[in-house]
Image (spheres, helix red, strand yellow):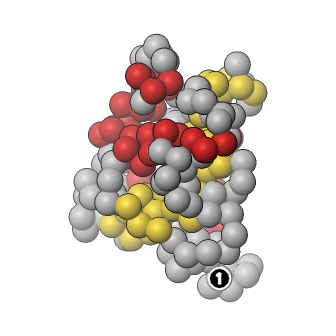
Amino acid sequence: MLDLTGWEPLGFSVDWATVEEELGVPLPADYKELAEAFGGGVFSESVSFMSCGASVSFDLPAQWRAALSAARDGTYGSVSAAGPYDAYTPGGKGVVTWGSTEWADQYCWLIDAERPGHCPVLARSHDPGPWYRYDMSTAEFLHRVLADADFRPFGIAHYGLGAMFVPESAGRPL
């Protein structure tokens, strides 16, 4: 991803032990490397990437807590916005969102506390279509989204946006 974007790693320090203790599972190692190198922000003017410790709009733990709170609310019954997948609950199985697009595509991991370290990527496009499962790393999925025009339905390279990154700071891209 660094080569693709020409980005110089920022070297953010993240307290992974605290984040993973709250979640109750380890996060993918390549995601942690991406988060430390890039922080939260936007790739190619359209793909949001959540980090840890960024502003609320790009903070993975804050977004996960909000999704978990909404799932536990009960106001709308048992309907799940991530259906058929529920928000991940510590010790259980469900989704944690790590990215999205301006077109409302959603990128998540399917996390199962009984299989720590195994985090396939789940993605769905903006229309109420199916979830797609990818048994690949977060970095590989993100690279394919940005660079592979044939990566349907998620590849954006065919739009000619280039592969760049704009970090987020204080609620606004820098």
Q: Amino acid at mark 1?
A: Val
| Quadrant showing the N terminus | top left
Q: Which one is nearer the viewer's eye here, 171 or 164?
A: 164
User: What percent of the width, then of the height, locates residue 45?
Assistant: 69, 34
Other-residue count near label 1 (Cα within 10 Å), few / some / many at <14 / 14–19 / ≥20: few
Q: Is residue 151 left or right of residue 137?
A: right
Residue 46, relative to residue 40: is it above or below? below
User: What percent of the width, then of the height, locates residue 116?
Assistant: 25, 58
| Point 62% across, 85% down: residue | 78
Circle count: 1
Residue 114, relative to residue 173: is it above or below? below
Q: Which one is nearer the viewer's eye here, 148 or 95?
A: 148
User: What percent of the width, then of the height, locates residue 174?
Assistant: 70, 19
Residue 30, relative to residue 102: is it above or below? above
User: What percent of the width, then of the height, locates residue 143?
Assistant: 44, 40
Determine if residue 59 is in view: no
Q: Helix, strand or loop at disc 1?
A: loop
Task: Name the residue beneath numbered marker 1.
Answer: 79
| Point 33% across, 48% down: residue | 137
Determine if residue 152 is in view: yes
Q: Is residue 58 left or right of residue 147?
A: right
| Point 56% across, 30% down: residue | 163
| Point 58% across, 26% down: residue | 164
Residue 148, relative to residue 13: is it above or below? below
Quadrant in which residue 160 is drawn: top right
Q: Is residue 27 left or right of residue 172?
A: left
